[in-house]
Image: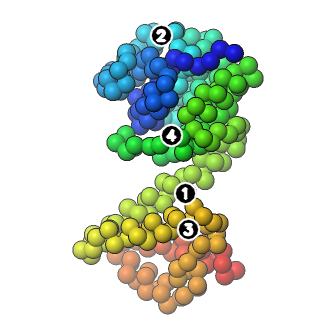
Amino acid sequence: MEMIEKIILLGAGNVATHLGMAFQRAGYSVLQVYSRESFSAESLAGKLGCASAGRMESISQEADLYVIAVTDDAIASVAVRFPHKDKLLVHTSGTSPMDVLKAGSNRIGVLYPLQTFTKEVAVDFSTVPICLESYRSADDDRMEAFARSLSKTVVWIPSDQRRILHVAAVFACNFVNHMYAMAAGILEENELGFELLRPLIGETARKVMEGDPREMQTGPARRNNKSILEEHRKMLSANPDYCKIYTFISESIRKTYNP
């Protein structure tokens, strides 16, 4: 079986940055970084010590794996211009179907790392679940071996289930972080520090890691404490958006535990 050894990144954002560093740490050679924005390609290529490309025609055909790591809206446009139709081409999206790559190659797949990425924040890739999908069974073994060299958790998931997983991840990560940002704003408006909440956040996360989150729910909505709920809404009345979100989520919790 021909193993994956050389990789080219098509994209230069957060995901591409973390993937490139993870690939190098695992011993793979990143040959090139492509981006329509030449500065972005050159910047990431500089970090990885490899070549950059600002035009699709300049992408080398010497790699074993080509990884599209761009926004979902841009995947199809990158794929349709991809010049090497017999090369293994994958994307990293949680929502886009694998078939969006069909115009780019006859060997396509998905390598979706289930994690939140920020360029400046290091990630231990060995703990990141990697979700795989492949169009050709002949590519399954090499993709499996490659993914397992990066992470302890590798799962094969079809596009429809991967999309569901991504929706759940938005609730578990993006929405939760937005709530943290809202909490920080409420505290700042009242000259209180976000540091006061960090122990609470840590304990909440710890409990979720050890048990079913549905069994860990606490708070006034869980207890159906109507007087506290009303008091909180009054306190938030100056910010209608916050009050609306508070009311909607509290009602969802109340209905769940007090039908």
**Amino acid type at image mark 2:** Ser
Give how far across and how far down residue 137 sits, in percent. Answer: 75, 23
Say which of 55 and 17 sits in front.
17
For marks 2 and 1 on the same chain, the one whose residue lies earlier in the sequence: 2
For marks 4 and 1 on the same chain, the one whose residue lies earlier in the sequence: 4
> From what the image shows, is residue 198 above or below residue 101?
below
> From what the image shows, is residue 120 above or below residue 145?
below
Q: Which residue is disc 2 drawn over? A: 60
Q: Secondary structure at mark 1?
A: helix
Give how far across and how far down residue 106 sits, in percent. Answer: 67, 16
Q: Which residue is disc 1 drawn over? A: 172
Instruction: Determine the residue located farthest toward the right in the rendered image.
Output: 137
- The Cα–Cα distance between marks 2 and 1, rounded to whole angstroms, is 39 Å
- The Cα–Cα distance between marks 3 and 2, rounded to whole angstroms, is 48 Å
Q: Nearer the viewer, mark 3 or mark 2?
A: 3
Q: Secondary structure at mark 4?
A: helix
Q: Is residue 53 left or right of residue 208?
A: left
Q: Is residue 219 in view from this perspective?
A: yes
Which residue is located at x 52 percent, y 26 percent?
68
Q: Nearer the viewer, mark 1 or mark 3?
A: 3
Which residue is located at x 50 percent, y 29 percent?
26
Q: Are marks 2 and 1 in contact (CB under 8 Å)?
A: no
Q: Nearer the viewer, mark 4 or mark 2?
A: 4
The 10 Å Cα crowd at callout 3, few under 14, some 14 to 19, many 20 or more, is: few
The 10 Å Cα crowd at callout 2, few under 14, some 14 to 19, many 20 or more, is: some
Q: Which mark is residue 125?
A: 4
Q: Which residue is disc 3 drawn over? A: 207
